[in-house]
Amino acid sequence: MQAERIITKFILLLTFLFVLNIVNGQIRDSAQSYVPETWKKFHLGIRAGAGIQRSFYFEAGLSLQKYVYEARHGFMVSTFYAAFERTAGTSGETPVYGVKGGAELINNGAGGAIEIKYLANSDKEDVMITPKYGFGLGFANIMYGYNFSTNKYPFSNIGKHQFSLVINTSILFYHSKEKK
């Protein structure tokens, strides 16, 4: 019984050393996958989005995007934008129109944003500040935001919570731009 254990341990040790020798003898993989270059400056693009904040809303505007990639840390996308927003009217409430500006930062898929928007309809107006967090790739982002009203939430079709999907086209058309 004792001899069998010693032989089994010896065979396991030889197997381990044999596998270790094979692994060390292999050639390192030198294949390089293509990774996009870092954008040295901001690029202009079209921004379009849709979401829910008690009622459906959409936005359209322009964005400036900068893409940074570093092998050790991954990617980061910075976006500054200005857009027009329209929130659909609910029963008895008129639609709300507004303009907004903001900044988004996406780092390895996780993101955050802050936006300020001026909203108005025929008889009310408000300025809202909306911090957001979510995830995305820079060209498509899904975010949750919390609307802080400066006028005690005068619109019944705009609530405190907001979910949005936004598309920025700067990254989609980058291949046709100068890369250096």
Image (cartoon, rainbow, N blue to C red):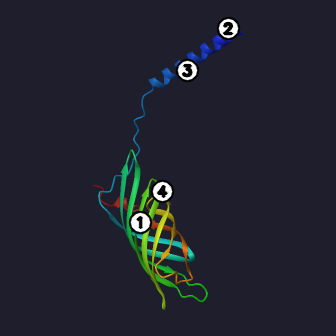
Badge 1 or badge 2: first in the primary sequence: 2
Amino acid at the residue labelled 2: Ala
Q: Which residue is mark 1?
A: 169
The 10 Å Cα crowd at callout 3, few under 14, some 14 to 19, many 20 or more, is few
Q: Which residue is mark 3?
A: 16
User: Depth-wise, is mark 3 or mark 1 nearer the camera?
Assistant: 3
How far from the left and from the top, in percent, is residue 17? 52, 18
Q: Quadrant of residue 105?
A: bottom left
**Image vertical order of residue 67 relative to residue 3, above or below:** below
Q: Which residue is mark 2?
A: 3
Q: Real-space Cα distance between discs 4 and 1?
A: 19 Å
User: Depth-wise, is mark 1 or mark 2 nearer the camera?
Assistant: 2
Q: Residue at x 54, y 88 (%)?
A: 94
The 10 Å Cα crowd at callout 1, few under 14, some 14 to 19, many 20 or more, is many
How far from the left and from the top, in percent, is residue 176? 34, 61
Labelled pair 2, 4 in contact (Cβ < 8 Å): no
Amino acid at the residue labelled 4: Ala
Labelled pair 4, 1 in contact (Cβ < 8 Å): no
Q: Which residue is mark 4?
A: 110
Q: Residue at x 46, y 66 (%)?
A: 167
How far from the left and from the top, in percent, is residue 30? 39, 35
